[in-house]
Image (cartoon, helix red, strand yellow):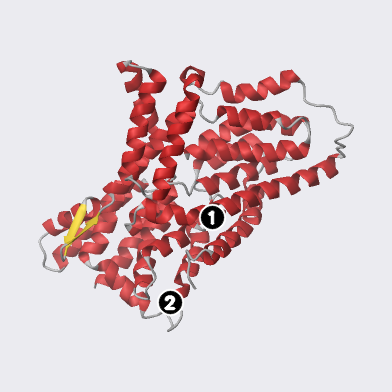
Amino acid sequence: MGTLMGAILIFIFIVAIYKKALSPFVALVAVPLVFAIFYCLITNQTPMNALNWVTEGVFYKVAKGKVTAGTFKSALMVLFACSYFTLMMQVGLFDPLVIAIIKLVKGDPLKIIVASTLTAAMVSLDGDGTSTVLITTAAFMPLYKQFKIKGIYLALLIALPTSVFNMTPWGGPLARVLSALNIDVAELFPRLLPGMVVVMIYAIVLAYFIGKKERARLGYDPAKAVNISQEEMEKMFDAVRKNDPELKRPKAFWFNLICTVIIMVMLVDGMANSAILFLIGLALCLVVNYGFNFKEQKDRLAGAMEEGMPAAAMIIGSGFFMGVLNGSGMGTAIATTLGGLVPAGMGKFIPIFTAILGIPGLIFLSSDGYYFGILPVLAKVAAGFGVTSVTMGVAAMIPLATYYATPLVAWIYILIGRTEVEFVDYQKGILAVGLPAFALYVLVFILTGSIPL
């Protein structure tokens, strides 16, 4: 009974999201709650058990003297981390670096392509794909047109670095994995860093070779080329400077930079709770950047939290789904059934299978469908073979390399519109550059022991 009901619950949840009948937040809350009440009735339990399961999933569960945190902990981290980096983007922390990168291009197609890749990487640090697309295309698409560089390359070299920085703690996918597997950011994020570094290097090397190819196609000779005029350079700078110029605080640059570095070092070392670190940083930076002005602090806090609040709400909503699956025993029943289908000696390969399954899973089911519907079940199966939740978390992040081939992310349509490419051409291209990145992640994580074989 538990296996059948759990499978139906997961299926309806995924279909509801895929068909866009329900928003992810509503599906995470309503579908498991209805199923939990129905399950209680047919198993002669009080429907109040459903609320107890949900409460345990969101807040905490005490079993055998051990306290297990719910999704609320991850939600707080996402809320304050997203808000902090949104504020840093608004005050212009990354502007000097982006402008320095743009200054290097000098009309060379190779330099333009590499610079656009680095700019996309810097801007995507706040975890917002839409702002990354708008700022990077505003700065570079005029140059791509002027020098007749193919727009598809800009689209791909924005999407690839953005997929790398989606692995940051304030990125939506990592927050979903932390919630689905009930693990702490300090356990998972440091294990992802080597793969992120290698794939970012791959993105830059890829940009270099694309630039060489474009040089040859366009007949560009660096020795005879004319540099971009200062007027054109200023237009590129303005694409960065004039993005919410009234919010910029260049005088506080060094404080913002030092504060951000300290937070990241303490987070990676696990020296303090990540939500507390970002909360403190957010409060300090609001005062330093906007002074002792109640209204401005309040407005800037509200503006910064616009990015973090929806993500945090969804993570809290996932506590309903996790709580019902775990509290009712449906999740354990499914895992036991699937575990019996895994051949002896093959259990250690479940993380690799999880990563491979994530390619179509993320593209066609959405990140919510895959991370909340499929991953928890696979993690329970893996646990029966001694595979840890952290290892499964690493595996679940790998398919982000090809995630942006999905038609389910809104900003991708902005990207293909502004770079003037067809979706089918973009999708083929991102899979072509994303699959090698996928292989690099697998190799790095195996070599570093994050995925033991």
Residue at 40% x, 49% y is 269
SS state under label 2: helix
In the rendered view, would you say 123 is above or below 299?
below
**Callout 1–callout 2 Cβ contact below 8 Å:** no
Q: Of all residues shown, which one is farthest toward the right?
A: 224
Q: Which mark is residue 347?
A: 2
- Give residue 263's position: percent from left, percent from top: 41, 39
Pick whichever, 36 or 399, lies toward us.
399
Judged left or right of residue 393, residue 439 is: right
Q: Of all residues shown, which one is farthest toward the bottom?
A: 344
- Give residue 327's position: percent from left, percent from top: 21, 62
**What is the total number of numbered labels drawn onto the structure image?**
2
Q: Is residue 15 visible?
A: no
Judged left or right of residue 242, residue 343 is: left
Residue 301: quadrant of the picture = top left
Amino acid type at image mark 2: Gly
In the rendered view, would you say 404 is above or below 253?
below
- Give residue 172's position: percent from left, percent from top: 42, 46
Disc with the residue nearer the chain's start (1 vs 2): 1
SS state under label 1: helix
Judged left or right of residue 96, residue 105 is: right
**Image quadrant where one finds the N terminus:** bottom left
Q: Which residue is mark 1?
A: 194
Pick whichever, 192 or 70, lies toward us.
192
Amino acid type at image mark 1: Pro
